Image: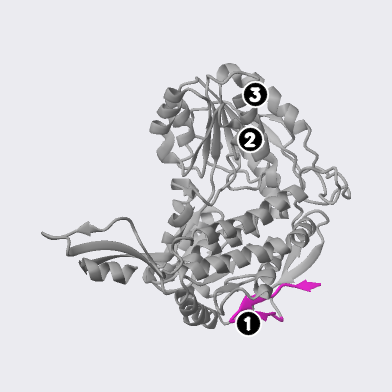
Amino acid sequence: MQKLRSYVQGEWFEASSGFRPLTDPCSEEVFAETSTEGLDFAAVVGYCRDTGGPALRAMTLGERGAMLAAMSKALHDQREALIEYSVESCGTTRKDAKFDIDGASGTLYYYSTLAKGLEERSCFADGEGVQLGRSARSWGQHAWLPKRGVAVHINAFNFPAWGLAEKAACALLAGMPVLSKPATSTAALTARCVEAIVDSGCLPAGALSFVAGSVGDLFAHLGPQDVIAFTGSADTGRTIRGDSRVLDAGVKVNVEADSLNAAVLAPDVEEGSDVWDLFLRDVSREITQKSGQKCTAVRRILVPKERLDDVLGELRSRLEGVVVGNPRDKGVTMGPLATAQQLDDAVAGVAKLQEHAELVFGSGQRVDGIGNDAGRGYFFAPALLVAKDATAQSPLHEHEVFGPVATLFPYDGDAATAAKIVSLSEGTLVTSVYGDDVKWLSTYLQNGGAYTGRLYVGSEKGADQAPGSGLALPQVLHGGPGRAGGGEELGGLRGLALYQQRVAVMGDRAIVDRMIG
């Protein structure tokens, strides 16, 4: 039996009791176990602050960038082994495993390139300076400085590699040490990633710590210079925000939570056009990629009423080609859900949606997987529903089924109407709109833009280069308002702001400029 270890205080820690099992989602057999019992979280946090923090702050931005490039290389060098282990331990297809692993190494590499032009600096200016008095000698300049605490990263189960890397890239480049805690169910893959990075020797002591299992009393040792970045359910996000120590100490918290993302087809899109094909390709992929277990997956599909049958027919055809089963079988194109609880939640969730929508494709129940023993595994086939009343406030806009499930909403074709329907969820990570009518698209932006963190536009001229609505690129912000958590990550250098303090420096311009560099 494999025992996962935590990497803390510069060494690997293995507990001797209090273990929690990790289960293969195909066979349902326990393949590993993990525990943090016996960890002294006060000492763990202190080591991050007192050892990792000073080491990172002593580095220039150029040196931190080089460190991220080395981390990226460490993961890329182990790419094939990590992909195979993702298939074995997480039940992902090779294609989905590549998406996770390459997303991790790619994000680290991208952030390493942002240090170019800032090589000799340890901090950087925020915008242009401003004259404060009757001459330019009296000057004000805002600057970003790294917080002097620890960045606690609590990640979701669906991206055990990418989740680790995207948060760590921003924090480490900002100059803040990282304590990463992945979801226990898929922590085995995260552990392999951390091992590869640690073994490469590219990190200063204390820069990266890893906790495999419960966080115990970790929050009790956090203070006002610390940061918590969380990705997961809205309920857990509320619990973290409401923690008494977090509130009393003023710990900065960033949350990325549930999101009923929407894809909207504009009325000008003609059947068979490039935009029509892009829309169908994006939506079908976002329903099934990672078995629908993505925070950016499409949950609601808005189509003009007169196009409903056409879109439904096309989606049926595409989803009928999805082969659900054990990803060790080369013919399988979609693996199982991650855990037994995720399967139970998906079945219950579809039943809840059926009170307000008609199930038109799929069973909404567990299925047997191809290449797997009958009755075993957390397999769930794609499902489509059609809303009975698109404009009514209902669980269709409130309850996310975290699996390969989406609901179609017929609407009248008006951009303002579409925006109003999408806004009923009170916030998305991403909303995608498809069309070439700039007036229609602009109307949607004005009416619905405030309800999403990212608006992805699919158009004819951009169709051949469209990255897909579900791809969280490091160049642009990832996060969303309201139900989506209200947080922001990535977005180039904007992603560093979470881990830094913006300071207004006032004084003689020559001195201020030299202080900031």
User: Residue 38 — which label?
Assistant: 1
Residue beneath disc 2: 282
Q: Earlier in the sequence, mark 2 or mark 3?
A: 2
Residue 447 place in picture, x, y as percent: 39, 32
As measured in the structure, the alpha-carbon distance from the residue carrying label 2 to the one carrying label 3 is 13 Å
**Pair 2/1: label in front:** 2
Label 1: element kind:
loop
Nearer to the camera, 243 or 460: 460
Q: Are marks 2 and 1 in contact (CB under 8 Å)?
A: no
Residue 320 place in picture, x, y as percent: 77, 31
Residue projecting furthest to the top: 306
Nearer to the camera, 360 or 413: 413
Residue 351 sits in quarter: top right
Q: Count up the numbered dots.
A: 3
Provide the residue span drawn in magenta: 1-16
Which residue sits at x=56%, y=42%? 399
Residue projecting furthest to the left: 134
Q: Residue flagged by tag 1: what amino acid is it?
A: Gly
Q: Residue flagged by tag 2: what amino acid is it?
A: Asp
Q: Is 514 left or right of 32, judged from the image as shown?
A: left
Circle 1 residues within 10 Å: few <14, some 14–19, many ≥20? few
Instruction: Indicate whether 426 appears above or below 115.
Output: above
Which residue sits at x=75%, y=43%? 380
Asked whether 14 falls inside the magenta stretch, the response is yes
Residue beneath disc 3: 311
Residue 85 sits in quarter: bottom right
Q: Residue flagged by tag 3: what amino acid is it?
A: Val
Q: Is 399 left or right of 289, judged from the image as shown?
A: left
